Amino acid sequence: MRPAEPGRVAQRNRTRKAIVDATMRLMAAGQTPSIADVVQAAEVSRRTIYLYFPTLEQLLLDATLGALSQNTIDPVVGASTSGDAITRIEHLSRAVNALSAKTMRLGRSLIRLTVEGDKRRSGSPRRGYRRIEWIEQSLESAYHSLTRKEFDRLVSALSVLMGWEPLIVLKDLRGLEPKEAEDVLAFAARAVVDAALRAKR
């Protein structure tokens, strides 16, 4: 297993997750929550929420996507019984990119909000934290084969091969349909992991 993140980073991730989870619970109960509702449900201050989510729109989008991924991506990551990092990454790649194709409208909105939003403090990602967690979990079996720096580089490389961003590139530059793009990105993800592991043999 990968060692725990540095304390401050881990705390920020826990705080962000608490905010999103509280918002998801409120939405699941049929509410369109306000910031005040989330403050009460997550037991954090308004200032803390705005440190992570500059607008309510961004928080609601993030929570909506979180609910969708809980039902589609989390089972894929948890259900994989293969110890083969390459196979697990391919399964993750296909699941993430299939969902991303279906949620492209939401994805474009979230990208716009984070790209055009205010500069955020160092160590606090604007978005994509779930993607990073899924990749790290899928690479667990490869962790001890790599140095910490090599593992982090591999996670970073894979993070640009999953999600709305590479799908947009492949549609705009190559004219690919979603399934074609999914196949290309699964191929690329497998190749990146294979290259990283081969370099250590």
Image (cartoon, rainbow, N blue to C red):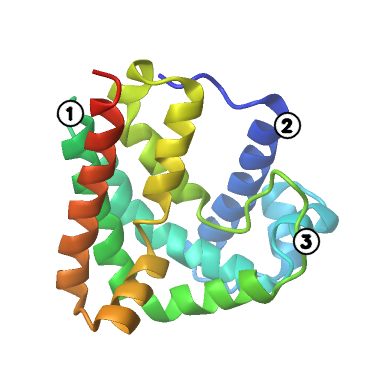
Drawn side of residue 191 relative to residue 135, left or right:
left
107 or 28: nearer the viewer: 107
On the rendered image, what quadrant is the C terminus found in? top left
**Residue 84: mark in rendering:** 1
* Vertical placement of residue 123 versus 196, above or below: below
Residue neighbourhood size for the residue with mark 1, other residues' Cα within 10 Å, grouped as few (<14), some (14–19), many (≥20)? some
- What is the CA distance from the residue labelled 1 to the residue labelled 3? 40 Å
**Residue 50: mark in rendering:** 3
* Vertical placement of residue 84 versus 32, above or below: above
Residue neighbourhood size for the residue with mark 3, other residues' Cα within 10 Å, grouped as few (<14), some (14–19), many (≥20)? few
Q: Position of residue 148 (x, y in %)?
A: 49, 23
Sequence order check, earlier mark of 1 and 3: 3
Q: Position of residue 49 (x, y in %)?
A: 75, 57
- Residue on which disc 2 sits: 8
Q: Position of residue 59 (x, y in %)?
A: 62, 65
- What is the CA distance from the residue labelled 1 to the residue labelled 2? 32 Å
> Could you tell me if residue 121 is visible in this image?
yes
**Residue drawn at point x = 51 percent, y = 27 percent:** 149
Q: Position of residue 37 (x, y in %)?
A: 70, 63
